[in-house]
Amino acid sequence: MNKFQLHEKALKEIRKNKYNVAILPLGSTEPHNMHLPYGTDFYIADALARKVCEIASKKGAKVIQLPPMPYAVNTNLLEFPMTISMQPSTLDAVITDITKSLEKHGIYKLVILNGHGGNQMRGFLRELYTKTKVFVTVLNWWDAGIKLEAGIFERPGEHADEKETSMLLDIFPETVNMKNADDGAVRRPKVKSFEEGWCFYVRPWKSYTKNTGYGDPRKSTRQKGQRYISLVSEKIAKMVVELSKAKMAKGFPY
């Protein structure tokens, strides 16, 4: 039995341990080009959370992983069949209830390990800040790994690309069908300034992509995924160890 996943534990074991950090893997259920499964985002978030918990626990962190959330904000992919989407307000309400439950049980540090780009929660976190004593931080695994990509991936993109495909080839290879992968090309916006990234807008994924892919996955390998997952997990685990050992006080984390 795994030592760090709440959903794999029984009450007797939970009562024996004291945790001060919870990790919530947050994914989505949506298509990922023609070759990756709909569960890609939560498979990756869950796999990273498991590895982070293992590394951080060995270094003294009192950490537990919550069950992964497979649903998220996918309002701009609903034109694709079987995309499952929450409204942002629904996601906010679910996270609020999870946070209140943790507070009830004396866990005052929550790390949301996000695996889906549509889960933007900065405004929500400002609101939640006034409602709970729990310190909440959200991280996107690709942001944690942005400086670690060099020398690993030849054609990184954003969705069902070489990076995500290589990760799935490592953690869940039986779900990947590389024969069905296309080049992941996307269309350019009519407003050229939008390509510079400083204007935010909701991208209509049906008109933006061919088959939901963004980035060419055809150079993906398991070895690339394994190396990248190891580096990203170590980086996130370092933060979790520091967070676990930091004493909670007024004005935390300062």
Image (cartoon, grey):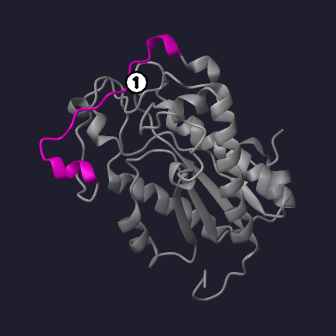
Quadrant location of the C terminus? bottom right
Left or right, 59 with respect to 249, comes to right
- Tell me where the magenta segment starts and ends, as one range: 177-196
Near mark 1 (Cα within 10 A), the count class, few <14, some 14-19 or many ≥20, is many
Residue 240 seen from this side? yes
> Residue lying furthest left in this view?
190
Q: How many marks?
A: 1
Q: Position of residue 134 (x, y in %)?
A: 58, 73
Q: Looking at the magenta stretch, what is its main secondary structure?
A: loop
Q: Which structural element holds mark 1?
A: loop
Q: Residue at x 17, y 41 (%)?
A: 189
| 140 up-or-down from 116: above or below | below
Q: Residue at x 39, y 73 (%)?
A: 127
Residue 144 is inside the magenta segment? no
Left or right, 253 with respect to 61, comes to left
> Residue lying furthest bottom in this view?
250
Q: Position of residue 30 (x, y in %)?
A: 40, 32
Q: In which image quadrant can residue 80 be found? A: top left
| 70 up-or-down from 96: above or below | above
Q: Residue at x 52, y 14 (%)?
A: 177
Find disc 1 in the rendering and name its residue.
33
Q: Position of residue 163 (x, y in %)?
A: 53, 35
Left or right, 164 with respect to 201, comes to right
Q: Position of residue 202 (x, y in %)?
A: 24, 48
